[in-house]
Amino acid sequence: MTRPPTPRRVLYGMTLVAFVLVLVPWGALGGAAHAGKSPPYRGTAWVPNVSVNHGGCGVAKLSPKPSWSGTTGAISLGVAAGANYCASTTAAGVTNSASATSEVYVAIPISFATSGNHTLKASWTMVLQVNQSVSLNSTCPVASKNPTLYQYAYCSVDVYAGLYAYAHLTDLNNSSSVWQTNAWNPLYNDTSYYVNSGCYGGSCNTYHNLNHQWSGNGSLSGTTTWTWIFNADGRQAVNASHRYALIIDLSASVRIYEYGNPIGFSGGGASVSIDMASPSHDWKLTSLRIV
Amino acid sequence: MTTGFRARRTGTELRPNFRRAGRNCAAIAGVALLVLIAPLAVGASAPTVLRAPYKHTTVSYGSGYTYSGCARASIPRSPYWLPTTGLAGFSERAVANACPPLLGGIGSDSVGSYTASFDPNVPIHFTTNGGHVVTVNWSLTVAVRTAASITGTCPLAQPVKVGQYSYSDCYAATLIDLGVFANLHDITNGSYVYSTMNWYGMYNYSVQYNDSSCSGAACNYYNNSYGSFVNFTGTIGSAWVFNASGYQSINASHKYEIRMSLNGWGYAELFGYPYGYSAARLTSFINAGTLGNGWTLTSITIT
């Protein structure tokens, strides 16, 4: 009898790692300010775009629902997912899944006093906390030997968290857009772990792999600031008689997918969350400047 | 939650009692895997009728919703299955309102969608080889509704200069799709026996669009609607019949189960360019889980 290939106890406990992601003081960007805005932003509009799905023993939720305040310039949102590894006695395998995406589109009116080349600078600050954990206090049953048939056993878990922020300056009269020259790099982490064993005749092989993209394998918290720069020049130079809007798209997603065949891991589970909503957490548009 | 029951054979009918052999609860935020222990051993010489509680049953659930713009969707009642009674269900809904014209055209696409399912698997143990017929009786009490109230107008594309092009689109659609499916599954070799009798579910789809486009001063208009709405409240009774004969005859040494699935999904969608209908409200909902609604596995008869 082959010993189970999986360590009896595989535990990826995530301790909070706090660090500052990026620090770009917008005041250092230079340039003479011809016009500026800070909260409250008047005449704005926003809409949500959300998705929540779960299957098996997975649970996902928005915590809370996304929102935008023109008064404070703040977007508030949160997503969370969790899935305990629950077994099945059927031959259909085990799938536990949970995912949630919370996205906000914000439109802010921009007016230019003069035609010609202009640069719009949009500065923002984000305070967030991301928690991601995989706790597999369990084993993956090894494939059994069969003299004539190929036998296999498969156990896997995948945990993902991602955060994206984009923006563009759009000319409402002709639908053309100016994109930022300095896109903010998204934050994302995909942690996956699998154990796979196969037996043919009297020979068995076992494969296992742990992969993750974030250093620290899990959680982070901190503050980041950024300034998007939109150069409306050349053929995209501003026409002061046109109406313009800054369109901001902020999206947070979490996902867990667990699969086992024939029965998967014997226990444990995973959880992941992004918090940009608790009292000290949010995404905030701190200023708009036109030079 | 893990719960145990013991079955008692009375003549040729299994009359399960409710002696609980054990309980081990592992609640996972509203989603549970239910396993009843004690296999069902049924004979072949005379009809055997199985009723709730259903033994050694496993079930998996899934549900989700999305919404954007001025639409909202939800799962008011998450999928559930009660093996002690054979009752299962869920409820789900979506409402799409036309957004007012918003800055930058955001909100021109308002979509609410939902999906929910549960898949119970009831093990069946045959004691004799050969041909068998398994009849699964069920009933579904459900309220289903789609509706569209388009009270506003769609802005028309405006004539433009020669060589230029303009257009305006308004689109409204609703959908519900509710179905149940089952097969008799040979766990040992992976083969299936399909039912010779099926209920083909409820499916309703409606579309209305009002589009216009102008190439220079020449404009064209495209208006159409098709499909249908549904407003149904009632009970449907049906059965699956699995004729395991011939090359699919039962091998009593194999493990079998009846794999069932009830699933429902739908949406309410408003789309427009640049802004869509000035006023509209679409609804789509399926209630198969509250206010007396639900799906019931009435009995399983084996001959």
Image (tube, rainbow, N blue to C red):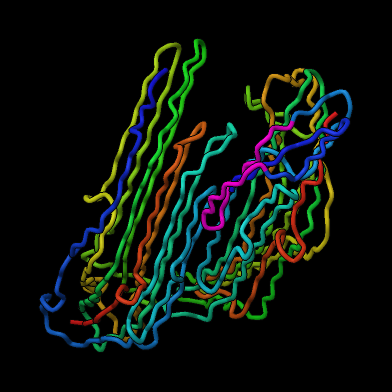
Residue A282 visible to an observer of this rendering: yes
Q: Camera-side residue: A165 or B211?
A: A165
Front position in the image: B50 or A61: B50
Is A95 on the left-hand or right-hand side of A44? right
x, y percent for residue A90: 60, 34
Q: Toward the viewer: A166 or A276?
A: A276
Asked if residue A4 is positioned above or below residue A105 in the image, the reply reads: above
Residue A91 lies left or right of residue B294; in this view the side is left
Quadrant (top left, top right, bottom left, bottom right) of the C terminus of chain A: bottom left
**Position in image of residue A192 (x %, y %):** 35, 42
Query: The N terminus of chain A appears in which quarter of the rendering?
Result: top left
Q: Which residues are magenta?
A: B21-40
From this view, report whether residue A95 is shown above or below residue A173: above
Is residue B196 among what the camera can see? no
Residue at image coords 53%, 81%:
B100
Q: Residue sitting at 15 percent across and 70 percent down?
A: A24
Check residue B81 for magenta coloring: no
